[in-house]
Image: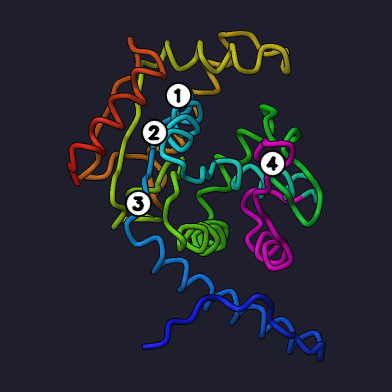
Amino acid sequence: MTSYGYPNYIRVNVGLRDENTKFLEALDEVLGSLSRTDSSKRLVITIDGPAGAGKTTVSKALADRLGYKYIDTGALYRGVAYEAVSKGLSYDDDLGLKSMCTDLKLQFVFIKKELRLISNDSDITDLIRTPEITMFASAVSARPIVREFLLTLQRKMGRERGVVFEGRDMGTVVFPDADIKFYLDASHQTRALRRYREIETKSSQSLQEVENDMKQRDENDSTRKLAPLKPAEDAEIIDSTDISADEVVELMLSYIKGGKR
C-alpha cells in the first residue's frame, strides 16, 4: 500500500472575500482533524479555582513540564471586559456586548517566548490586569452572550489536545469530558496576600482593598446562576495554602502519571 504524507504546499486561488473565508474555515477544520488524530494520546487538562490560588503559576509550569500549550481563559474574559469598557458599555448591555463580540477576534500568540493576548490585532496583555477590568470581567462573565462567545472559542482552542486550560469553569462547563481535572484552592488570607504581591508594583491598592475585592469577586463567581465557580465532581482538589507552586506541580504530575482519570 502506498503511504502519503502532507503536501509541501497547497495552491489557493484568490476569490471573493466570503469564498476565501469559507475555504479557510473548512481548511482549518480538516487540519484540526488531522492534528487530533496525530495527538490522540495527548491530554486536555483543566485547572479551576478562585483568584489567588496560584492557578497561573502552576498551570504555566505544568504545561511547560508536559510540553503542552497553556491557555489562560481568565485573560479572555478580561479581554472582553477591556474592550467593553473601552467602548463605554455596561456589563449588562447584552445587545451592545453581542454586537461587540460579533466583531471581536481574541487570540493568544507567543512574542519573544511570552504568551500575549491579541485583540483585533492589538496587544492588550498589559492593559487587562487593573482592578477596574478585574471587577468588570467578573460581572460580564455572568452574561450568557459573553459565555457563549468564549465557550466556542475555548473549545476550538482545545481541539488539538495537549493543552492545559486555566479558569473557573473549565472542568465543569467548557470541558466536562477533560482527561484530567484539578481544582486548586487556598485560604482566603493566603490568596489575598498572593494577589497583593502580584499587583503591588502596578496598583495603589492596599492589602485590605485587595482582600475586599477578592471577597466580592468570590461572591460573584460562586453565586452566579450561569456556570458558578465550584469543583467538578471528578476533579482532584489541591489546597495550596501551605505548599509551594513547585510542590503543587509535582503533585499534579504524580496524579497524571498514576493514570488516575
The stretch of residues the image draws in magenta is 89-115
Disc 2 crowd, CA 10 A, few/some/many (<14, 14-19, 20+) = many
Kindly report the distance in space between the C-alpha atoms of the residues bearing marks 4 and 3.
23 Å
Tell which circle, 1 or 4, labels the residue nearer the N-terminal end: 1
Give the amino acid type for the residue marked by disc 4 in the picture: Arg
Give the amino acid type for the residue marked by disc 2 in the picture: Gly
Q: Residue 45, labelled with which disc? A: none
Question: Quick check: can you spot residue 218?
Answer: no
Q: Which residue in the protein does label 3 denote?
A: 43
Tell which circle, 3 or 1, labels the residue nearer the N-terminal end: 3
Q: Residue 54, labelled with which disc? A: 1
State the residue in front, 127 or 161: 161
Tell which circle, 2 or 4, labels the residue nearer the N-terminal end: 2
Q: Tag 3, which secondary structure?
A: loop
Between label 2 and label 4, give the one nearer the viewer.
Answer: 4
Give the amino acid type for the residue marked by disc 1 in the picture: Gly
State the residue in front, 156 or 92: 156
Q: Is residue 37 left or right of residue 196?
A: left
Q: Which residue in the protein does label 4 denote?
A: 116
In the rendered image, which quarter is residue 12 located in? bottom right
Asked whether the beta carbons under mark 1 and mark 2 sit within 8 Å of each other, the answer is yes
Q: Is residue 191 magenta?
A: no
Kindly report the distance in space between the C-alpha atoms of the residues bearing marks 1 and 2.
9 Å
User: x and y percent of residue 1 in the render?
Assistant: 36, 88
Q: Residue 49, labelled with which disc? A: 2
Q: Tag 4, which secondary structure?
A: strand
Between label 3 and label 1, give the one nearer the viewer.
Answer: 3
State the residue in front, 43 or 5: 5
Kindly report the distance in space between the C-alpha atoms of the residues bearing marks 3 and 1.
21 Å
Give the amino acid type for the residue marked by disc 3 in the picture: Leu
Kindly report the distance in space between the C-alpha atoms of the residues bearing marks 2 and 3.
20 Å
Q: Residue at x 65, y 75 (%)?
A: 8
